[in-house]
Amino acid sequence: EPEVTQTPSHQVTQMGQEVILRCVPISNHLYFYWYRQILGQKVEFLVSFYNNEISEKSEIFDDQFSVERPDGSNFTLKIRSTKLEDSAMYFCASSSPFDNNEQFFGPGTRLTVL
Amino acid sequence: QKEVEQNSGPLSVPEGAIASLNCTYSDRGSQSFFWYRQYSGKSPELIMFIYSNGDKEDGRFTAQLNKASQYVSLLIRDSQPSDSATYLCAGFLGTSYGKLTFGQGTILTVHP
């Protein structure tokens, strides 16, 4: 069964450093998303991406964040200058508009900012 | 602020019983709702979605949507210890058709 994959599973970084989180969405999906979940809190939407453009973004997704689809398979989230409060699980998801936009989540990257 | 609200629980049911999980949402114009299961330390796993008023059944799971009352529920029949997890209600609120707004989740424990 096709699935969303994410790398790395765990990233530790120093405050102020740049990180890139990587995702490979399900191959025939057209919509891609990033969510985050701070420990013990709700899953929060960050951004949606379609046709090489951001479709929607949340207030969390400020100028420190960017997304890119550098090739036909990868989808990345970059955080330019990490803060302590960026420590969270980051989930990538993808969906097809032909399947009610059901979103399937990857296993997540745990980001720890020290 | 568009919200999805869930009782965080924990909800404890004996094995074989029906577990009932509930969710309310703030925006009357909201269209589609999804139930996810999340085991500790893992990612959300899609169980089912519903967009029409009424019931939708899939195996041991039944989702119910009442748009007039802005209420979504999930029934799990013949609950098993392996169903013990956090259940997340999420929806496309308002006119959004991509941004999922999640509730805080209900912790379910099924005891043998």
Image: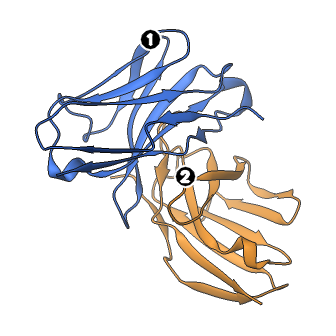
Q: Is residue A89 left or right of residue B13?
A: left
Q: Do callouts 1 and 2 point to residues on the same chain?
A: no
Query: In x, y percent, where is residue B20?
Result: 70, 77
Front in this rendered view, residue B67 or A2: A2
Q: Quadrant location of residue A59?
A: top left
| Circle 2 SS class | loop
Tell me if label 1 and label 2 are in contact, CB under 8 Å: no
Identified at 43% across, 37% down, the residue is: A8
- Chain at tag 1: A
- Chain depicted in orange: B
Q: Quadrant location of residue A62?
A: top left
Extreme residue in the right direction: B59
* Residue B96 appears in the figure: no
Q: Which residue type carries mark 2?
A: Ser
Disc 1 designates what residue?
Answer: A52
Query: In x, y percent, where is residue B30?
Result: 54, 46
Q: Which residue type carries mark 1?
A: Asn
